[in-house]
Image: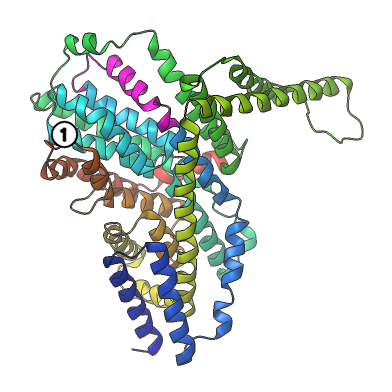
Amino acid sequence: MELAEILILLMVMATGGFLLCGFPVAFTLGGTALIFGALGIVSGVLEPRDLMLYPDRIFGTMTNSVLMAVPLFVFMGVMLERSRVAEELLESMSYLMRRVRGGLGISVTIVGALLAASTGIVGATVVTMGLISLPTMLRRGYSPSLAAGSIAAAGTLGQIIPPSIVLILLGDVLSTAYLNVRRELGDAATHTAVSVGDLFAGALVPGLALVLLYVAYQFGVAIFRPQDAPPYDAAHFEAEGVEVPNLLQAFIPPFSLIIAVLGSILTGIATPTEAASVGAIGALFLAAIKRGEGAKWPVYSGLYAIIGLLFLNSIFDLRIGRTITPMVDQIAIGAGFLMCALVVLAVAAAIIRSINSGILRSVVRSTAQTTSMVFTILIGASLFSLVLISYGSDDIVHNLLSNLGGGRMTALIVVMLVMFILGFFLDFIEITFVVVPIVAPALLLMGVDPIWLGVMMALNLQTSFLTPPFGFALFYLRGVAPLEVTTGQIYRGAVPFIIIQVIALLMIALFPALATWLPEVIFG
């Protein structure tokens, strides 16, 4: 074994040791990289110029427009969580599904999927659903295991259903790896980069299929084990006072926001970053209307102005600075400026209403904390992966996977198992920024489709986060579950959903078109 390979092994072991001792992940990655980078220079394995690429990496991160979507989507998710959209959705969905066997459990799954599409944050979804749904399900006689498993599984849908933070980060890393591989093969000019929009489109069908599998399981339990999922009891709804007129108010705003964000990305109208800004402003408007104090007409006028802008843009040419602008277009441009002014006033009114209601302060603080965590880990992981690659870890991994025997499928299985195990101990951010840049180039060189690979990785991490005894989603739920719900019941409830996710993984592995068909149809 060469010295470089020994240092790589020691570096990985040291990182694991520091993490087990409880050191913060970002500082563990960065500190270990500095120590072993210095050891490599002293021993002559590395050259100082190898580490001089680090400032360029940081600058690339700072100027990466895709990563700007992260704080915007985090803001959108936290704002929807604080504005109690989830509570209204669950109440309304429970009312709609009241006569369906297992209706409450199915409602939890569907609302979890909607929250996943709204927030993209696993922890926020699990905690919110645990606080809202678990006491209600227990009160209506649901089995604690089924209730806990349903909530934990629904919460992890944020990993795979776009707009997911996981997919955004994976898309950025896979795009870089794919372009590097094409340059190495000498055909970069004939291939386009893998975009976040591609990954969103690729994950949409598998994500919806997973929701359907969850619902089918809930329905099956209600039929074959009715004692675990009791049927409809009119007394519950009379006591809780869910009224039919509230249904549209609960469903239309979040549905409209999801369609606006995903639709603008999938139709090519907006980039993920631009769509994230639409989602952030839409969530701010929604919170101001639902929870703010004072007149609501300025916020409504801003919403109508946005719709008017979209209408004008679809009919007239609103570009300014043209040499010749027809009178009709000039009038449309003037109307567009007026509508932009209304949007600005609506944003100001929504901010004031959110401040007065006490929502905005906590949302901004939570967004800043989450965003800081993501980018601090990114900075540490960037240095960590730079040192590993400077030692030649990418070549070692490529040779190892190529010599396994069994071709790319064996290599993919090994990578998935490693990521699955790492998902017990590391968050998706560390895995995305440290592991994926090392293993993805080797798999892409073997001809693995990058979109299919990204969807498989996201679904694999989702399964890992749900698997006992270390699944993050189970820890989140344990933190908010009532004391009468034991940890063993939470673990037992998660097992059927883990089996469902493994089935989904096998389906996508056997039928890659489930992940690649929609991106090809939309983006070619």
Mark 1 burial class by Cα count in 10 Å: few <14, some 14-19, many 20+: many
Q: Quadrant of residue 16?
A: bottom left
x and y, in percent, of residue 112 in the image: 33, 32
Outermost residue on the right side: it is: 323
Which residue is painted at 42% across and 66% down in the image?
27
Looking at the rendered image, the quarter that the N terminus falls into is bottom left
Image position of 480 with respect to 228: above or below:
below
x and y, in percent, of residue 93 in the image: 32, 20
**Residue 254 covered by magenta stretch:** no
Q: Quadrant of residue 496?
A: top left
Q: Is residue 138 left or right of residue 71?
A: left
Q: Is residue 22 left or right of residue 379?
A: left
Question: Is residue 439 visible in this depiction of the protein?
Answer: no
Which residue is painted at 28% across and 50% down in the image?
472
Which residue is painted at 26% across and 60% down in the image?
421
Query: Which residues make up the magenta segment?
Result: 80-102
x and y, in percent, of residue 279 in the image: 53, 33
Looking at the rendered image, the quarter that the C terminus falls into is top right
The amino acid beneath tag 1 is Leu
Q: Is residue 369 left or right of residue 320?
A: left
Question: Is residue 142 visible in this depiction of the protein?
Answer: yes
- SS for tag 1? helix
Residue under pointer 1: 146
Front residue (pair 483, 88) = 483
Q: Quadrant of residue 343?
A: top right
Q: Main secondary structure of the magenta part?
A: helix
**Residue 94 covered by magenta stretch:** yes
Front residue (pair 448, 320) = 320
Image position of 318 with respect to 201: above or below:
above
Which residue is painted at 58% across and 55% down in the image?
193
